[in-house]
Image (tube, helix red, strand yellow):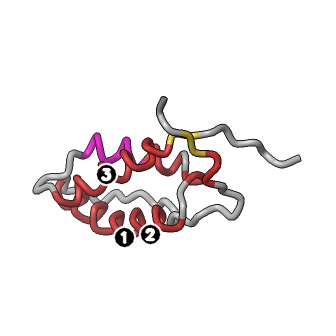
Amino acid sequence: MPELRPPLRRDRIDEAIAVLEQAAAAKTIPARRYRAARKWLDSNRFYLLPDDCDRVNELLPTLDNRLREQESSSVSLNIPAFVSHPQMDPALYYERP
């Protein structure tokens, strides 16, 4: 039996990607906010469309490198690239009432 996915507000995805874009534009990356958005996107990757995956995948390497330098850390997260799920249907999105 296929796994039934609950609907998700589309604006949640847009907001999380906007956090990454804002972090990329910032002089100093807001680490806690960036990590929270990245973790949320990773947990909800099923819902990302191909364009979303492209945007996220373009931002992550630069952000991760900058954050490592910013925090003088050699630790890096090895999260697989975002790829759209073939069973994702935009009908699973809903708008805020």
What residue type is disc 3 on?
Ala
The residues bearing labels 3 and 1 have C-alpha atoms spaced at a distance of 13 Å
Left or right: residue 76 compared with residue 62: right
The span shown in magenta is 31-38
Residue 58, label in figure: 1
Badge 1 element: helix
What residue type is disc 1 on?
Glu
Residue 54, label in figure: 2
Badge 3 element: helix
**Does residue 69 lie above or below 7 as drawn?**
below
- Which residue position is annotated with label 3? 18
Say which residue appears at 64% left-offset and 49% top-offset.
Answer: 91
Left or right: residue 7 compared with residue 2: left
Provide residue 53's location: percent of width, then percent of height: 48, 64
Badge 2 element: helix
Q: Residues within 10 Å of mark 1 (few under 14, many from 20)?
A: few
Left or right: residue 96 compared with residue 92: left
Provide residue 43's location: percent of width, then percent of height: 54, 46
Q: Which of 65 and 51 is in front in this view?
A: 51
- Chief SS of the magenta region: helix
The residues bearing labels 1 and 2 have C-alpha atoms spaced at a distance of 6 Å
Q: How many marks can you see?
A: 3
Q: Which of marks 2 and 3 is nearer the N terminus?
A: 3
Question: Does the magenta-highlighted stretch encompass residue 82?
Answer: no
Provide residue 28's location: percent of width, then percent of height: 13, 52
